[in-house]
Image (cartoon, grey):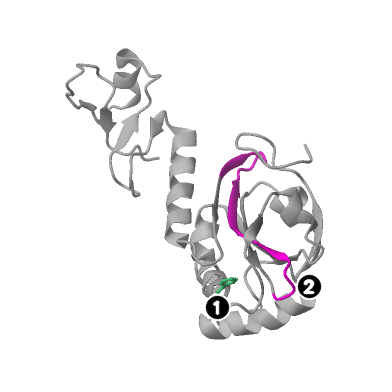
Amino acid sequence: MSGKPRLGELFPDFSAETTVGKINFHEWLGNSWGILFSHPADYTPVCTTELGKAARLVPQFQKRNVKVIALSCNSVNSHKGWIEDIKSYSMIQGDAFPYPIIDDESRDLAVRFDMIDPAEKDKDGLPLTCRAVFIIDPNKVLRLYFMYPATTGRNFDEILRVLDSLQLTDKYKVATPADWKQGQEVMVLPTVSEEEAKSLFPNGISTVLVPSGKKYLRETPQPVE
Ligand code: BEZ
């Protein structure tokens, strides 16, 4: 597949120059989950806070077997200079930056992956990339994406939360409800029969009574390894 990424389909492979050299995306991912996130431009305030937050969360991503990679429509040289500001602003120690940043000065990837926001333009009147997040699983399948405009920074704790949900619901026949957080009750999938549910969830199931009388709201403690 080479066009626009779609949920549930193979995320397109690509090669690109990055702050750690040339990469082939699928090869770089290996057997990890991946987060590819774009931002409008280097040396901009909200982006600086976002890349710093993502850098500080790298140990959390590693715990979940997730590799992080950023993208903006500037050169590797520009990214390398900007990294020093990000490290200073977010108080990140050491010489290395904990994840690569892709050089998409040509805007090839921004266009190919539909990350352009026509409402936001740079000083030359060219449209900027939006704040896209793509979450890709170890089979290279796109599992989740969202897009924010340039003026709204993303919530990186939400990114960890959805990763936890994706990884949990891959293992068990459950779904996570609104505002769910690690350790809270989850919902039994509607496709699971009552019989099967009893054997799959030995910690018990409580069925919420609703006016329709239908027994579809089945809660169970979060399964653990
Ligand atoms: C920012 O990162 O602060 C930003 C970038 C482009 C447009 C608006 C804000």
Give x and y (percent) for residue 214: 24, 17
Question: Is 33 on the left or on the right of 127, as rendered?
Answer: left
- Which is more toward the observer, 69 or 37? 37
State yes or no: residue 102 in magenta.
no
Whether tag 2 and tag 1 are in contact, CB under 8 A, the answer is: no
Residue annotated with mark 1:
45
- Which is more toward the observer, 93 or 71? 71
- Which is more toward the observer, 20 or 78? 78
Q: CA distance from mark 2 to mark 1?
A: 18 Å
Disc 2 residue type?
Ser
Q: Foreground mark, 2 or 1?
A: 1
Q: Is mark 1 within 8 Å of ligand 1?
A: yes
Residue 208 vs 71, above or below: the answer is above
Residue at horizontal 66%, vertical 54%?
Answer: 115
Residue at horizontal 59%, vertical 55%?
Answer: 132
Residue at horizontal 35%, vertical 37%?
Answer: 223
Give x and y (percent) for residue 77: 78, 78
Q: Quadrant of the C terminus?
A: top left
Question: Is 16 on the left or on the right of 39, as rendered?
Answer: right
What segment carries the magenta color? Answer: 123-144
